[in-house]
Amino acid sequence: MGISATKIISLNGKETYCEEIWEDRFSENKLQDYLKRHHIEATDIEHFALTGVGNDQFGDSLLGIPAIHVDEFDANAKAARWLCKDETFIVVSLGTGTSFVLLDGPTSKHLGGSALGGGSLYGLFRLMLPGIDYSQFRSLATKGSLSNIDLEIGDVSKEALPNLPLDVTATNFGKASPDSKPEDIAAGLVNLVLQNIGVMAHLAGKGFGIRTFVCIGRMTTLPHVREIFDRLEQLYKIRLLIPKNATFMTAIGAALS
C-alpha cells in the first residue's frame, strides 16, 4: 500500500496475478472485486500479507481471513533475495520517494532514502506542464531531446574531462528557457529524477564496495529508464538491474514473507 497506489499480487505456486489500484483508496470491497476478476475463491486463500505506508489501517484479518503485516524494507529485501539469491547488492525502491536497502548474505539493512522520487516527478510536471495528465506526460517524454534541455560537458568544454565524456550531463535543465518545448521539459524531468537516483545509488554502493543494484517500483517503467540506466552503468561501471514485475516486487516480498 503505497502513497500513490496500491499494488496487489496473488501467488499460488502456479499462476501470478498483478494489479494496481490508483483511483481510490484500498478497501475490502476493492479486494473482493480483485478476487472476482481473477476467479479466486476466498476459501482458497491461506492468508493476506500487507505492507507499505497504509497497511496499519487494517487489523489482523481481511474478509475474515488472517492478515499479517510485513515491514516494507524487509519485503523489498525478501523479494530481491528471491530473485538474486546470495549475491551482495543494494535494493533501490523507486516509489513516491526512494529507499536503499543493503543485502549482504542473509542479512539486510536499510541504509536510508531520499524524498526525490515519483512524487517529485508528478508534482514538477504538474507545475511545469499544466493541463496534461500522467499518460500524456509519459507520451511527451518519449519525444523529447535531453540535449535541448540539459547542459552537457560538451557545451562547456571542447575536450572530455577525466572519466566524463562530452555527452555527460553537467547540469539538469541548464539549457531551459521560456521557449523550451513541452516534450523536452518532460524528457528532462524524467532524466532529472532517474539520473540522480542512479547517482545516489552509486554513491551509496561505493561505501560498501557494491556495484550491483536491483531497482524496483513503478518508476522503473518510465520512458527512457533503460537508456538512462545504461549510461550510468557505462559511466560508473555498475549494474542497475530491473526485474520482471518490478512494480510489484514489494508486494511479492510481503507474500513471500
Image: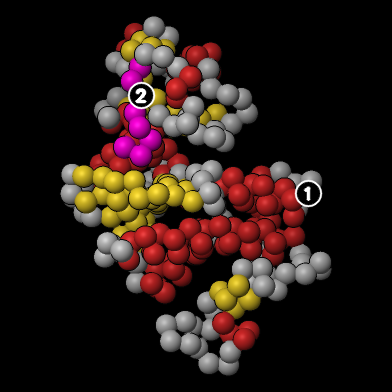
Instruction: Give the left or right position of residue 198, taking residue 101 as reference.
Output: right
Residue 174 versus residue 9 in the image, above or below:
below
Q: Label 1 belongs to which residue?
A: 130
Which amino acid type is shown beneath numbered disc 1? Pro
- Dot 2 crowding, Cα within 10 Å, few <14, some 14–19, many 20+: some
Q: Residues within 10 Å of mark 1 (few under 14, many from 20)?
A: few
| Visible residue check, residue 93 | yes
**Quadrant of the drawing holding the C terminus:** top left
* Label number found at residue 69: 2
Give the number of marks. 2
Q: Is residue 69 magenta?
A: yes
Residue sitting at x 59%, y 31%: 22
Please state the horizontal and vertical placement of residue 175, each as a whole percent of the image: 70, 74
Q: Decide if residue 214 is on the left or right side of residue 34.
A: left
Q: Which mark is residue 51?
A: none
Q: Residue at x 42, y 74 (%)?
A: 235
Residue 6 to residue 89: above or below = above
For this orientation, the residue located farthest to the right is: 179
Q: Tell me where residue 76 appears, x and y as whole percent.
A: 35, 41
Q: Is residue 238 above or below residue 153?
A: above
Q: Quadrant of residue 206?
A: bottom left
For residue 19, say whether it is visible.
no
How much space separates mark 1 and mark 2, taking CA atoms? 39 Å
Circle 1: element type:
loop
Residue 75 x/y as whole percent: 33, 36
Q: Are marks 1 and 2 in contact (CB under 8 Å)?
A: no
Sequence-wise, the earlier of marks 1 and 2 is 2
Looking at the rendering, the stretch of residues picked out in magenta corresponds to 67-74
Badge 2 element: strand
Q: Nearer the viewer, mark 1 or mark 2?
A: 2
Was residue 11 drawn as part of the magenta stretch in this picture?
A: no
Q: Is residue 83 left or right of residue 105?
A: right
